[in-house]
Image (cartoon, grey):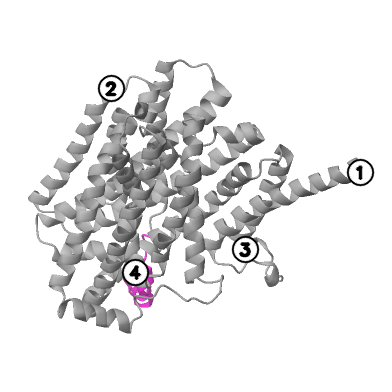
Amino acid sequence: MKMLPVVDLAIIICYLIGMILVGFYFSRKNDSSDQYSKASGSIPGWAIGLSIYATFLSSNTFLGVPGKAFGTNWNAFVFSLSMPLAAWVAAKYFVPFYRNTGQISAYTHLEKRFGPWARTYVVVCFLFTQLARMGSVFFGIALSLQALTGFSMQIIMVVMGISIIIYTVLGGIKAVIWTEVVQGIIKTLGAILIIYLIVTNMPGGVSKIIDIGNSAHKFSLGSFKPDFTKSTFWVVLLYGFFINLNNFGMDQNYVQRYHTAKSSKAASRSVWLCVLIYVPASFLFFIIGSCLYAYYSVHPELIEVIKHQAAIERLPVNATAAQIANMAAHLQPADYGDKVMPHFMVTKIPAGLVGLIVSAILSAAMSTISSGMNSSATVFTVDIYKRYFKPGVNERQTLNLLHIATVIFGILGMGTGIAMIGVKSILDIWWQLSGIFAAGMLGLFLLGIISKQTRNHEALIASIIGGIIILWMTFPNIIPAEYPALRSSLHTNMIIVVGSLSIFLIGILLTRLRKSTSSTAAS
């Protein structure tokens, strides 16, 4: 632990002040809820594309992906490879659909299609997803800055959270998008800088990194066997397709941006721009993880400090030195991968450059959190408060409610991040939580869009059965130990795949049974 040099602190403070000033700048024009939530459809497509990219590339990517590559291999990169197909579906079908509805909320049409229960169900799933996302991102910020400053992770989350809340509340969606444009550029340059610094500090350079990576199978994309009980190539590919389909098609973070575009064509292009940038950018972070693995392989003495810190976080505060040492001795690379890059920053990156890279990590976190706060506030205002409590609130009251809800969701996100302290992998916990909550959303959405003849009660029954299946896969221990065959053996990343397909296919089956019964009765 050490304090950052003055020059690095100055860079970070200037960055934070700059983001807050952006919020003040756009606050002058935020005199209506339409401006706050949709920017009155005035944002160019390229800026929206960079904004979506910045939201995708959160601190879960900046820290979690190198940590995952360090601890395992490149299996998680298959997630990025699934994005183009999901983007094609979104650009062709989802973007025009939302632009034509004119509704700022992604979930209003579900009430028209199946009734109030469907809208409320999906809204609740979305809000839980956002809390999981913001919490994991807050945790990612704190993980890095704790290694650099020695401050507690709780204090770091609160200070960063207040900064994000200020510019998001003041500037609305315009501040979110334009700060994300800057943040997307900063974090990409930060990744390139980190690779350069690792390679220049690595004895033997690139060739040595490749040799070590090959010998440890670090570049593997996973097994190609049709095994869905482990994190194989096919499991991650399916997970990636379904979760990205949910992101582009159901996530208010992205749907809300479609409405800020000047045209449907510009909105569709923004989706493709995001994919074209994100796939190679995510590749950079897997390179970072492999480079770090090679570096610490030739410097094994440095790993002991990291393992010691990881052990302290996993044990109670009153743990003895012997307990900490014993825990550290049994930790595997996958258990402390997220801590490796912060340690490298502390020990090997010179003053001045640390401030730039910390700003990049903050950019990765702040872009995702700010968009999550804004979209959560919008959904709460439109789909809950105005739907169930005060439908007739005026424009000024709506704007005030958006501000208050933004603050509340920012605080809840911080609380979720604090609760995640000590988790094994940022990326694992985020993927698991997002898959659980997104499964119900996507299945019902696809049923409503594709099956035009499915009725309210059929969708409700399908959602209930699908929900039971999701719970069965999420909590296999609810099945008594004496019935192991009844427990789900599928990998947790398959929850969104099986859950979504269950709701969709059961809904289709019930619809066909009704039609078949009606035809038989008529004849």
Check residue 367 for magenta coloring.
no
Q: Give the residue displayed 79% in from the left and 49% down from the top.
A: 513
Please say if the residues under marks 4 and 2 sit with CB atoms less than 8 Å apart.
Answer: no
Above or below: residue 92 compared with residue 299: above
Magenta residues? 315-335
Q: CA–CA distance between discs 3 and 1?
A: 46 Å
- Residue designated by label 4: 69
User: Residue 490: percent from the left, percent from the top?
Assistant: 59, 67
**Nearer-the-camera pick, 102 or 472:** 102
- Residue designated by label 2: 29
Q: CA–CA distance between discs 4 and 2?
A: 44 Å
Q: Is the residue marked by circle 2 packed among few (<14), some (14-19), or many (20+) residues within 10 Å? A: some
Q: Earlier in the sequence, mark 4 or mark 2?
A: 2
Secondary structure state at the residue bearing disc 1: loop
- Residue designated by label 1: 523
Instruction: Please state, as top left, top right, bottom left or bottom right, where the C terminus lies in the image.
Output: top right
Secondary structure state at the residue bearing disc 3: helix
The circle drawn on residue 476 is 3
Q: Earlier in the sequence, mark 3 or mark 1?
A: 3
